[in-house]
Image (tube, rainbow, N blue to C red):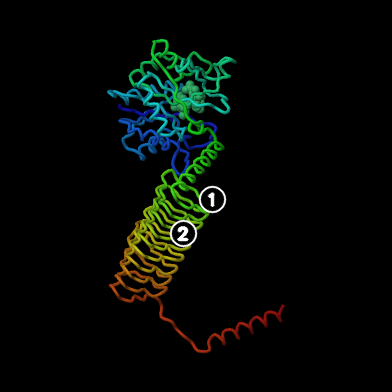
Amino acid sequence: MNIALIVLAAGKGTRMNSELPKVLHPIAGDPMLIHALEAGAMLEPQRTVVVAGHGADLVRHAALAHDATIKVVEQTEQLGTAHAVAQARPALEGFNGVALVLYGDTPFIQPETLERMRDALAQNDVVVLGFEAADPARYGRLVMEGQQLDRIVEFKDASEQERLITLCNSGVVACKADLLFDLIDAVDNTNASEEYYLTDIVGLARERGLTATAVTCNEAETIGINSRGELARAEAGFQTRARATLLEDGVTLVAPDTVFLARDTVIGRDTLVEPHVVFGPGVTVESGATIRAFSHLEGCHVSRGSIVGPYARLRPGAELAEHVRIGNFVEIKNAQIAEGVKINHLSYIGDATVGAAANVGAGTITCNYDGVMKHHTHIGAGAFIGSNTMLVAPVSIGEGALTGSGSVITSDVEPHALALARAPQVEKPGMARKLFEMLKAKKAKQQRGS
Ligand code: UD1
Ligand code: MG
């Protein structure tokens, strides 16, 4: 069955009180829109259409950066959810299959739930995702007749009796695309909000003798985000679930509540994560690694047996092979660190390759940026970089070479050579004593004078 996703993301999100379109506010490191798109992507849709409105350019950019095949259409005026879906019609020209409507501000719908909706379409023309609301508040209510969904009534338009219904509309709808657009053509805006309600397609389908039903899911899946408070609660909910999943998967989190994970964090079995570690987007950690306290990782890979931190920072493009040791106050960016390398203290290694078993001394800096361009540093296998070496890129240190502490290395070093690039030491016998006596005499004179 061909699937097309239609993700509604045109709303203003007034209550966010933000310059950023609501759907681009991040949860677990990714815009909430991406969470919705990824849930839908599990159904392997033929086409995906995002309906943008407020902040359309930013939304388009974020959607295309995530997946360049997405079609972004614009709804210039927000006249209601049915009107929003209608904007996707041209982008689905020639599409023959099922359309699934999701909201860009509803990030936690599970792929399995969407699969159940798709399966329910075998017996029904329209399938709506509902949930039993603890507090039904202003949600649309699902009016059931046995297993059939008769219609959806919005809170504003509902009678006292209908408001007692606790089965609510999540907003997710599945229907054959041609039928969906056909039904939407018949939706009008004669209601309390004067909006074109997508929810009206259920009643319209039933009037035509078609069938509709509701698939239900847990309320937690359907939460929508409208304010910073709800965003913070959604983040907390995500983190709680993601930590629990890692624990079940055999990862040790010493203090789970202090570890922050991204949507796509992958951590292998028997890896140990100490307290207060932050995983940004794009991190994979293999089995049997240790991430020590107060480290920050994003866009990086850590291989088996490596130890990172405490207080380490791995930035995008940091690739650690097996049994690497990255210590405190070390920052690694866009660098391949080969097996057994040690970079233990106070270093910056950026735009670099470091060969196997090299030892990078405390305070080593790759001077990778000249103010305009970035340059590469290569450190050969088994090299020993003395403490406080400045490696002025582009530069290459040969295999097994040694640099003297405090050197500013500006040209390549041959394999197995010793490179020293610092002022030679000068020693003046007795000079320290003379200097101190002079200074003490000066101070005594000043105190007499005052
Ligand atoms: C909608 C449903 C309601 C359901 C609730 C669940 C309708 C008429 N009502 O109500 O039954 O219980 O969601 O949260 O569908 N959007 C657009 N363009 C528009 C209008 C909305 O893109 O013109 C987008 C919004 O950005 C949002 C989604 O559609 O992502 C839902 O819109 P919203 O205004 O929040 O609908 P509700 O009134 O909450
Ligand atoms: Mg809403």
- Contact between marks 2 and 1 (CB within 8 A): the answer is no
Q: Counting other residues with Cα less than 10 Å from the Cα at mark 1, is it few (<14), some (14-19), or many (20 or more)?
A: some
Instruction: Relative to 187, say whether 23 is above or below.
Output: below
In the image, farthest residue toward the bottom:
429
The location of residue 234, given as percent across then percent down, is 52, 38
| Horizontal side of residue 400 vs 28, given as left or right | left
Give the answer, above or below, for where 341 lies relative to 54: below
Q: Secondary structure at mark 2?
A: strand
Pick the front one: 55 or 149: 149
Q: Which mark is on residue 283?
A: none
- Residue 431 vs residue 244, the one in the foreground: 244
Q: Amino acid at mark 1?
A: Thr
For the residues carrying marks 2 and 1, which lies nearer the camera in this image?
Answer: 1
Q: Position of residue 368 (x, y in %)?
A: 37, 61
Q: Which image quadrant: the C terminus?
A: bottom right
Q: Please name whichever residue, 215 or 429, is drawn nearer the observer in this view of the structure.
A: 215
Residue at disc 1, secondary structure: helix
The residue to which callout 2 is attached is: 312
Displayed quadrant of residue 64: top left
